[in-house]
Structure formats: C-alpha cells, structure tokens
Image (tube, rainbow, N blue to C red):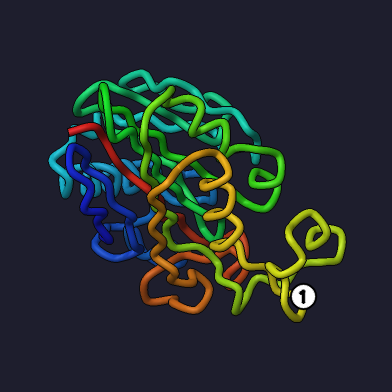
Amino acid sequence: MIRWDEPGYLVAFTTRSGGVSSGDYESLNLTTGTGDVAALVEENRRIACAALGLDAQHLAFGRQVHSTIVRRACAGKRGEPGDGLWSDEPGLPLLAMSADCLPIAIVRRDGRRALAVLHAGWRGLTEGVVAAGVAALGPGAKAAIVGPAIGPCCYEVGDEVAALFDPDLTVDRKLDLWGAAERALRAAGVEAVERVDLCTRCHPELFFSHRRSGRARGVQGVLGAVA
C-alpha cells in the first residue's frame, strides 16, 4: 500500500501485492467484475481494509460508469452507479477502483472532517467529476492526492480526446492524466495537491493495467476513511 500522510484521515492506494487471488488476478484484486472468484475478492477487500484498521463489512463502493456522479456513502452499500463517494462519518471505509484511470482522494482540512474518493478517466475529467467531488465536501480548505494511473509515458490517445484538454498536456499523442487531474483539482479550489506519479502500465509488479493486460486483470484503488 502507498499511504497518504494526511492528519485526521486514513487513506492509501492499494497495489496488486498481498492478496489471495491468482493467475491474471494475482493477488490483491478488488473487483469481481473481470472474472475473479467472489470469495477471493472479498478476502482481498478484508485484507486491504484491515491494513488501515477498517471494517470491511462497512466498505462502500459504487458501480463505476465514467460519470460525474458523487454519492454520499452508506456503510456496506455497494453497486449504485457513480464514480465518487464521500463521507464525514468516522471509520466508514470508501473505495474507488482503477486499473489505469485515476484514483483520487480529497479531504476537508477545516471544520468537520470529510473525505471523497474518485475514479476518473479522460471522460470523467472533462465532464467534471473532480469538481463534483470537491463540491460534495462543502466549503472550506481542502487537500487532495492523485494516485497511480497510466502515465504520460504510455497513455496514447486520439486527436478527439487530446482536443478536450489543454494543448500542452498531450505530447506525441500521449496524454498527461496526472497533470490534467492536478489542474482540475486546483481549478475547483483545492490548494494542496500531491501526486504519486507512478505509471500503472509500466509497473506490472505493482499494478494492474487495462492497457497492458486487457479485461482479464484485476484492479487496485484508493481506500480511505475519516479517522
């Protein structure tokens, strides 16, 4: 796990290491949506939650559809369409999954603590999922971290996608999602933005990648809770 040192919160980006799945899903795969055994995935989720001292029975996550929908999480509620969850309830674990798309965590630094986790690909970025996640947390100073995703070394896109972003974000037909996410966060009013800047496609020992492996693969994600 790659942990974010943000006071008042428990947030980490999972890797593919330390779980119980095998084959294409080795080993800490967090989804059943690409063919892994449900019981193994549930154990992987339990392992990930336990690493942060969280109860996997309360784990909340959505059915990600490349949207701008950010919902308030309810303990144990899973599968509603949307690409973000937020909560101000201490100890409620939230998960957003990814396998090249961006996993993002946003927190409120003043007033009542609140956390949002987002899944964002090029479509979500251009349509406003980051702004929706920031807005869900209400007023106040905020901080965010952009987790491992496919990097500008590997993310080749067509002209129609490149045209949706600032021109300098695409070089030799390769889009910088990390930079695009940081700009979206700052434009939405987040002053403190950190980035992990690890490419999921370049690091098969650490991460699942759709561009590298196709559909037969697992996912990692951002997992977190208000402390």
Question: Where is residue 54 drawn, in percent x and y?
Answer: 18, 36
Which residue is painted at 32% across and 48% down in the image?
Answer: 40
The residue lying toward the viewer, choosing from 40 and 71, is: 71
Which residue is painted at 49% across and 23% down in the image?
Answer: 71
Using residue 167 as the reference point, say whether residue 107 is left or right of it.
left
Which residue is painted at 50% across and 79% down in the image?
Answer: 202
| Among the 4 quarters of the image, the one containing residue 13 | bottom left
Question: Where is residue 96 drawn, in percent x and y?
Answer: 44, 42
Which quadrant holds the N terminus?
bottom left
Using residue 227 as the reference point, say whether residue 36 is left or right of it.
right
Using residue 37 as the reference point, say whether residue 185 is left or right of it.
right
Using residue 134 as the reference point, say whether residue 12 is left or right of it.
left
Identify the residue under disc 1.
173
Label 1: few (<14), some (14–19) or many (≥20) C-alpha neighbours in 10 Å? some
Which quadrant holds the C terminus?
top left
Q: Secondary structure at mark 1?
A: loop
